[in-house]
Image (tube, rainbow, N blue to C red):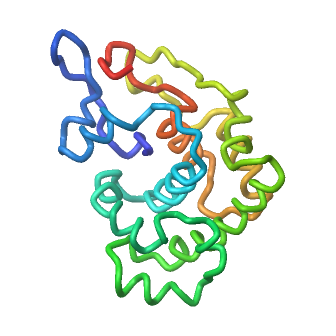
Amino acid sequence: MSLLNEEFNTEQKSGHQTCAWALKHELERDYHDKEWGIPVYDDQVLFEFITLEGAQAGLSWITILKKREGYRAAFENYDLQKLARLNEEEVPRIIESFDVVKHKGKIASVYNNARAAIELQKEFGSLSNALWQFVDGKPIINQWEDMSQVPASTDESKQMSKFLKKRGFKFVGETICYAFMQAMGMVNDHMVDCPKR
């Protein structure tokens, strides 16, 4: 989730400063408390978030969270083998039949990215190995006291973006890659006083 487009302050809760963006909506709270920033190594979940972070570009994260089940239904629960066999001809059906962001390019990118992800699995043994290499296989634990300290991108996200684009991925700019890294726990960007840190 890109926090750049989200108001991010801190609010006192249970003696700790908690990430205020997560207090606006129950879905955001649940996502923050149970998923955001927790390291993920599962290829299927990693691919789900490549898809969701790309879909979020230009939109609020709550919009994507509300459509998350629609994405799972539309995209075969992120089964890479099934997705790789499909192509852009599926886009009109997806737009008409599922609750997803109605952007043809973003929808078509899922099929393209699935094929590219399979190639990475072949080359690196897993999508996880290919992506976690940018943080040497372990999370970067940041010490942010204020959201203004959190960068939009980092050298690692720039390297990841360049790597993925070179291998044919779409909607993987450096800011999207940083949001992906935050979501998948490659970086821990909870504020230092957040109880979920």
What residue lies at 74% left-to-right and 35% top-to-bottom?
Answer: 133
Specify the farthest residue to the top. 15
Residue 25 found in image quarter:
top left
Looking at the image, residue 120 sits to the left or right of residue 193; the answer is: right
Q: Picture coordinates of residue 112 (x, y %)?
A: 66, 71
Looking at the image, residue 21 sits to the left or right of residue 138; the answer is: left
What residue lies at 40% left-to-right and 24% top-to-bottom?
Answer: 190
Q: Is residue 50 above or below residue 8?
A: below
**In the depicted view, which residue is nearer to us: 158 or 188?**
188
Q: Picture coordinates of residue 72 (x, y %)?
A: 41, 65
Question: Does residue 161 appear in the picture of this structure?
Answer: yes
Residue 157 found in image quarter:
top right
**In the depicted view, which residue is nearer to us: 148 or 77?**
77
What residue lies at 61% left-to-right and 65% top-to-bottom?
Answer: 80
Residue 16 found in image quarter:
top left
Q: Picture coordinates of residue 64 (x, y %)?
A: 35, 58
Question: Does residue 152 appear in the picture of this structure?
Answer: no
Looking at the image, residue 5 sits to the left or right of residue 13; the answer is: right
What residue lies at 20% left-to-right and 35% top-to-bottom?
Answer: 23
Specify the farthest residue to the right. 123
Q: Picture coordinates of residue 151 (x, y %)?
A: 53, 31
Looking at the image, residue 42 sits to the left or right of residue 33; the answer is: right
Location of the C terminus by quadrant is top left
Location of the N terminus by quadrant is top left
Q: Is residue 179 above or below residue 151?
A: below
